[in-house]
Image: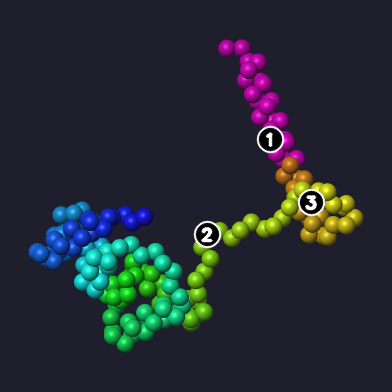
């Protein structure tokens, strides 16, 4: 969800286009002057649809196309973002950095978030005879047993501290 509604952005842009003054308009609406500039450029390039939030994934080829357009037209990331309808110029700057470091392969869409947990099934491991376990499985089973023992010790200590608090005279 976008921080600002489309109607609010349109109101800001109309005020900016009517009377100008980036800092005056940003002060009037209590927002960043870079937001005013970004919305005005997007509005001038795409009209009302330029103010819609964009949350799409871009292909590596599209990213290279944007970078090539910037180089050919000698423009910075901000007008390029407005031209291509990209939400933030920092996205393009990040693409540029990745491309300079690793080429087009570095621009491939990466998986977001934490990697999924390993497909480790402790129940199956506990049922397996010890003689059939691999060294890695033995190590994993030992780690599980140690964690279980530590948990039980902590549980016992908490139970004892609760019992001593209840037995103390007030």
Dot 3: few (<14), some (14–19), or many (≥20) neighbours within 10 Å?
A: few
Looking at the image, residue 158 lies above or below residue 91: above
Q: CA distance from mark 2 to mark 1?
A: 32 Å
Task: Using the rendered image of the protein, determine whether residue 35 is visible from the camera's viewpoint.
Answer: yes
Question: In the image, which residues are magenta?
Answer: 149-170
Report the colour scheme.
rainbow
Residue 13 position in % (x across, y down): 18, 63
- The quadrant the C terminus occupies is top right
User: Does residue 85 show up magenta in the picture?
Assistant: no
Q: CA distance from mark 2 to mark 3?
A: 28 Å
- State the image quarter where residue 23 is shown: bottom left
Task: Using the rendered image of the protein, determine whether residue 33 is visible from the camera's viewpoint.
Answer: no
Identity of the residue furthest to the right in this view:
131
The residue that mark 2 highlights is: 113
The residue that mark 1 highlights is: 154
- Give the mark nearer the N terminus: 2 vs 1: 2
Dot 1: few (<14), some (14–19), or many (≥20) neighbours within 10 Å?
A: few
Dot 2: few (<14), some (14–19), or many (≥20) neighbours within 10 Å?
A: few
- Give the mark nearer the N terminus: 2 vs 3: 2
Q: CA distance from mark 1 to mark 3?
A: 26 Å
The residue under the point 36% across, 79% down is 66
Q: Secondary structure at mark 2?
A: loop
Looking at the image, residue 100 lies above or below residue 49: below
User: Does residue 150 show up magenta in the picture?
Assistant: yes
| Residue 62 shown left or right of residue 135 in the figure | left
Residue 26 position in % (x across, y down): 19, 58
Q: From the image, state whether disc 1 or disc 3 is nearer to you.
A: 3
Which secondary structure is most common in the magenta stretch? helix
The residue that mark 3 highlights is: 124
| Residue 15 shown left or right of residue 69 in the figure | left
Q: Secondary structure at mark 1?
A: helix
Identity of the residue furthest to the top in this view:
169
């Amino acid at each position: 969800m976008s921080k600002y509604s489309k109607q609010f952005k349109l109101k800001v842009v109309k005020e900016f286009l009517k009377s100008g003054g980036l800092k005056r308009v940003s002060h009037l609406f209590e927002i960043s002057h870079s937001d005013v500039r970004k919305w005005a450029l997007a509005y001038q390039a795409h009209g009302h649809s330029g103010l819609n939030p964009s949350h799409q994934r871009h292909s590596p080829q599209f990213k290279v196309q944007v970078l090539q357009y910037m180089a050919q037209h000698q423009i910075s990331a901000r007008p390029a973002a407005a031209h291509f309808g990209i939400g933030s110029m920092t996205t393009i700057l990040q693409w540029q950095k990745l491309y300079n470091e690793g080429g087009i392969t570095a621009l491939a869409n990466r998986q977001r978030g934490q990697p999924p947990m390993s497909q480790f099934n402790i129940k199956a491991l506990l049922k397996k005879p010890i003689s059939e376990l691999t060294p890695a499985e033995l190590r994993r089973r030992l780690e599980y047993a140690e964690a279980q023992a530590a948990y039980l010790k902590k549980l016992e200590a908490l139970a004892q501290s609760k019992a001593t608090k209840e037995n103390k005279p007030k």
